Image (cartoon, helix red, strand yellow):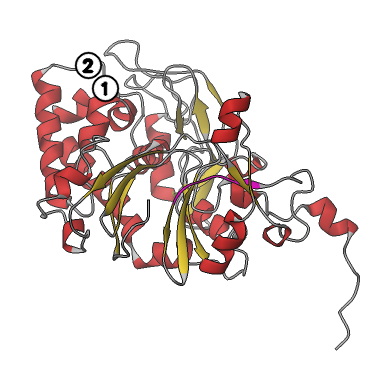
Amino acid sequence: QPQEPGPLVISRRGKQTFIGAGRIGVQVSWALEGLLVPFSRDDYEDIIAHDSPGNNPCPIKCERLRTFELPAKYQDEFSNPSSTRRTLTILAAFVTPERAYSITDNDRFLRFHVTTLDRFWSEEDMEPKSELWPVMWAHFKSGPDWHYEHDEAMEGLDRWRDLILSKNDFNTTVLAALLVGDYSNLFFASFGRHTANDAIHELRLFPGEPVINICSDDNRFQAFKTGLDNYIAQFESSAYIKECCNRSTSTNPLSFQKSVDDKYSSKYMRVFRKASVLITIEHWNEFARLGYFDPNHRIGTPYQIPPGAIITSPRSKHVRVPVWHRTDTLDAYTIIRAKAPVSGSWTDGAEEPAQDHRLDGYKSTVGPANFRILKTNKTHVETAIKHARPGRPKK
């Protein structure tokens, strides 16, 4: 239905987004392929002029769940030659005179909930202290945001600790607490698989350790609380926003930004889906003394440090170490190779060398540049070489 023009406002809680447009408000729960793409108004009108049936195997649904054919100008030169028919599924769009902000998801796994007011949504509504704040996030349950609701998030961790201790919970591991079930939704809303694995690495913990070990020790719990807070805060820093959230310099809003991918992968990813990682010499020596790099050692048992394991005369401040994917129930990424204790409800998994996410072709992986719809515009090396022109162009 036609809508009365109104202000466009936005807020965020954990991994969710709320966008108010006039009287309409949309709570977005992002899926793997979910992406907000800002098009110029002309580009947007160009795209939606080319709609076609979707890819659903059911002919009836195929007609209803339509998609948009991308004109040739959105296919960068020398990009993926196998992706000849490129489409974009736009689930919602917020249109202004100059720009259109499109919520896209070619897999259609993204979820959103619409809330309508009898007045326009305002910037004041987007603040955590507003009366409508609980209403905005009511449909997809989530705990406090670690940036906008920092004090509430820290208080929540104290309540979470009390829950773990009161239930005498030996079954929840460090990694599971951040990712699975009510604990994750209520107390760790700002964390996902990537950030949980990397934060645990930064805290120098084994991901399969029961959290009750941490919660029952005042010093360990305070270090856990402070470490998680410091880790997640980097994604609000001006350096991160400048390096990884800048607008594309290309005239094509769907271009792949290699510089953003390089910066994010090297600076803001630690162990999750990485083949190796740089750690400090001090970190290396701490783990070497504990036997954490020895696959034959069991954590918590006496360990005889082998000759040469400790770095005493470093040539640099860092050393590169391999990352291991602990599979099975644990499903974690870590540099620790030692086995988990047999007793005490620790969780372990078979280890295999981790593979770097950037070797995963055109699939969506990790980071603001690594969405499939953008990666199809990566330079295809063989195509580029085939069409390369030697020498400098004439002036």
Q: Can residue 10 be seen here?
A: yes
Q: Which circle marks residue 67 in the picture?
A: none
Instruction: Name the residue nearer the viewer: 91 or 307.
Output: 91
Seen in the picture, residue 113 relative to 75 is either above or below; the reply is: above
Where is residue 309? Give x, y as percent: 49, 37
Taking the image as shown, residue 71 lies to the left or right of residue 262, namely right
Residue numbers of the magenta segment: 87-92
Q: Earlier in the sequence, mark 2 or mark 1?
A: 2
Seen in the picture, residue 267 relative to 300 is either above or below; the reply is: below
Q: Which circle marks residue 210 in the picture?
A: 1
Taking the image as shown, residue 99 lies to the left or right of residue 213, namely right
Q: Give, as a three-letter code, the residue at label 2.
A: Phe
Where is residue 69? Give x, y as percent: 66, 49
Q: Are marks 2 and 1 in contact (CB under 8 Å)?
A: yes
Q: Is residue 394 magenta?
A: no
Q: Residue furthest front?
A: 1
Instruction: Name the residue nearer the viewer: 10 or 293.
Output: 10
The residue at the point 74 percent across, 54 percent down is 79
Taking the image as shown, residue 273 lies to the left or right of residue 28, namely right
At label 1, counting other C-alpha atoms closer than 10 Å, the crowd grade (few under 14, some 14-19, many 20 or more) is many
Quadrant (top left, top right, bottom left, bottom right) of the C terminus: bottom right
The residue at the point 9 percent across, 51 percent down is 131
Say which element carries label 2: loop
> To which residue does mark 2 refer?
170
Q: CA distance from mark 2 to mark 1?
A: 6 Å
Taking the image as shown, residue 318 lies to the left or right of residue 8, namely right
Seen in the picture, residue 141 relative to 267 is either above or below; the reply is: above
